[in-house]
Image (cartoon, rainbow, N blue to C red):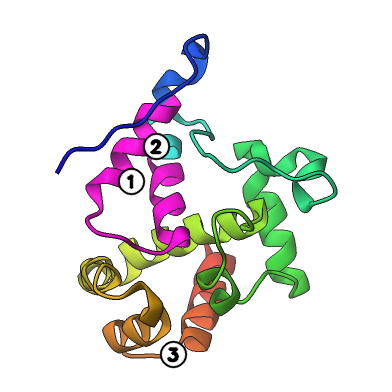
């Protein structure tokens, strides 16, 4: 299978980000959820380049991205932690059903963190999540719950405990 992507010709500063982001996305086979697609791309740019970016998401005026903190990798963890402590982070089921056009920077930050959690806490199940997600995008919730062996509400709770303990 071949993939093609593009970047603005004069955007050489972000070329590494775009390539890192897209290569990570292409490494996951099939058609899968937005949260997994974008989280994988952003996780790669954070791990390999220690920078954020490489996304086709444009923060909308009046959203939680307007403060600028969600595009600063040093502040993202602080903002996400504040939301988790206040109980204002989106439930995972909401993020699971979000489209690329509507995913917010805070939802993306949580998606990246959930991806890290799954990779480190449930590595065996992570591969099954990736394989299962390409089977039927419409059955995301059922596929995840079956693969993980617990509900999305439980995943959210497990993630919150892990996130606050780290």
- The mark nearer the N terminus, 3 or 1, is 1
Compared across the picture, whether 140 is left or right of 81 comes to left
Relative to residue 84, is residue 144 drawn left or right? Answer: left
Which class describes the residues within 10 Å of circle 2: few (<14), some (14-19), or many (20+)?
A: many
The residue carrying mark 1 is: 25
Compared to residue 92, the image places residue 35 above or below, namely above
Q: Main secondary structure of the magenta part?
A: helix
Compared across the picture, whether 78 is left or right of 121 comes to right
Q: Which structural element holds mark 3?
A: loop
**Are the residues flagged by discs 2 and 3 in contact, CB closer than 8 Å?**
no
Circle 2: element type: helix
Q: Name the residue: 49% across, 87% down.
A: 154
Image coordinates for residue 150, horizontal then vertical, percent: 38, 90
Task: Pick whichever of labels 2 and 3 is earlier in the sequence.
Answer: 2
Rendered location of residue 130, percent (x, y): 26, 65
Residue 75 disc label: none
- At x 22%, y 73%, the residue is 128
Look at the image and give the residue range highlighted in magenta.
17-44
Left or right: where does residue 22 sit relative to residue 73? left
Residue at figure coordinates x 25%, y 37% from the top left: 3
Name the foreground residue: 73 vs 7: 7
For residue 20, what is the image quadrant?
A: top left
Mark 2 or 3: the one toward you: 2
The quadrant holding residue 102 is bottom right
| Residue 23, image x, y percentages | 29, 37
Q: CA distance from mark 2 to mark 1?
A: 6 Å
Q: Residues within 10 Å of mark 1 (few under 14, many from 20)?
A: some
Q: Which residue is mark 3?
A: 151
Under tag 1, what secondary structure? helix
Specify the quadrant of the image occupied by residue 132.
bottom left
* Residue at numbered disc 2: 21
């Amino acid at each position: 299978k071949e993939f093609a992507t593009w970047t603005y010709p004069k955007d050489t500063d972000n070329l590494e980000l775009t390539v890192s982001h897209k290569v990570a996305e292409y490494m996951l086979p099939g058609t899968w959820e937005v949260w997994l697609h974008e989280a994988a791309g952003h996780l790669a740019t954070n791990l390999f380049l220690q920078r954020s970016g490489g996304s086709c998401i444009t923060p909308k005026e009046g959203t939680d991205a307007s403060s600028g903190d969600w595009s600063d990798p040093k502040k993202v963890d602080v903002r996400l932690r504040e939301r988790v402590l206040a109980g204002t982070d989106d439930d995972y089921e909401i993020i699971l059903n979000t489209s690329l056009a509507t995913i917010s920077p805070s939802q993306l930050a949580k998606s990246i963190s959930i991806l890290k959690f799954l990779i480190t806490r449930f590595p065996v199940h992570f591969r099954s999540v990736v394989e299962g997600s390409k089977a039927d995008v419409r059955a995301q919730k059922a596929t995840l719950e079956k693969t993980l062996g617990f509900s999305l509400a439980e995943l959210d709770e497990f993630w919150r405990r892990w996130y606050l303990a780290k």
